[in-house]
Image (spheres, rainbow, N blue to C red):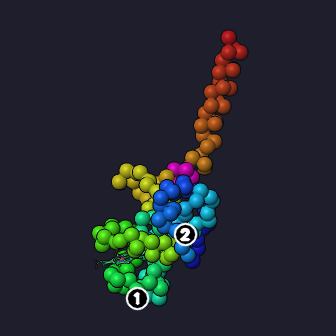
Amino acid sequence: MSASLTPIYEEAAPKSRTRDLPLMGEGTCHRTKKMPTLTKLYTMQEASQHNTKDNCWVVIDGKVYDVSTYLDDHPGGDDVLLAATGRDATEDFEEAGHSKTAREEMRALCIGELDTTSSDIPELEIFPENQPPGYPKKLANLTKRYWAVPVAVVGISVVVGVLYLRKK
Ligand code: HEM
């Protein structure tokens, strides 16, 4: 599994929040001080590969949680967590109306953040529908092969122009 390390700077949390939520044995993604932190970034595709009882990750609010050890303890059941893998589970998580305690608990399970920079969507190429595939490549090859034609036309025009002027 490949994961990149990116330093992330985050604003200092409001004082009251820092007091309410003392630093626990937490993962890398919940920070309470303004300092650079090395956060692991995972693509949704990587996260989605962890979808079994022994190895289960969920993505909530841009953060990746390894809930493998929490499956049996989850009051909502392990099945909902397993069903929440491979996609953004933020909506389901919020809909379940999780308590403040639940949100504190999940901090310890955070292993990184979702890499939103890489996209599985291929770059959009706009060509007319009836154009045969590989048309742009063919055009580029033709241009490379026949570059001498316009150069010769320009050259001949210059020579003819010079001869004409000399005659005058
Ligand atoms: C790290 C992630 C999660 C943690 C730590 C967590 C923790 C908890 C806790 C502590 C409760 C008991 C109620 C409460 O205190 O709010 C709970 C209930 C529940 N959770 Fe989660 N949860 C997580 C993720 C999810 C996800 C992703 C879903 C849905 C896809 C989900 C669905 C539920 C449901 C349906 C209940 C039962 C609510 C009820 O019966 O009233 N949870 N969870």
Quadrant where the C terminus is found in the figure:
top right
Residue with the most extreme top position: 168
Query: Per the image, is 91 magenta?
Result: no
Which residue in the protein does label 1 denote?
72
Tell me residue 4's x, y (percent).
60, 67
Amino acid type at mark 1: Asp
Which residue in the protein does label 2 denote?
23
- Tell me which label, 2 or 1, sits earlier in the chain: 2
Q: Nearer the viewer, residue 107 or 62?
A: 107
Tell me residue 144's x, y (percent).
60, 48
Tell me the quarter of the picture where residue 151 sits. Answer: top right
Amino acid type at mark 2: Leu
Taking 17 as reference, is 77 left or right? left
Residue with the most extreme right position: 166
Number of numbered discs on residues: 2
Quadrant where the N terminus is found in the figure:
bottom right
Disc 1 element: helix
Q: Residue sitting at 57 percent across and 47 percent down? A: 143
Tell me residue 76's x, y (percent).
33, 81
Q: Disc 2 and disc 1: Cα gap in Å?
A: 25 Å
| Residue 132 visible here | yes
Q: Residue sitting at 35 percent across and 54 percent down? A: 129
Main secondary structure of the magenta stretch: helix
Q: Is residue 8 above or below residue 163?
A: below
Q: 10 Å neighbourhood of mark 2: few (<14), some, or many (≥20)?
A: some
Q: Residue sitting at 57 percent across and 52 percent down? A: 141
Q: Nearer the viewer, residue 35 or 164?
A: 35
The span shown in magenta is 137-141
Q: Residue sitting at 60 percent across and 40 percent down? A: 149
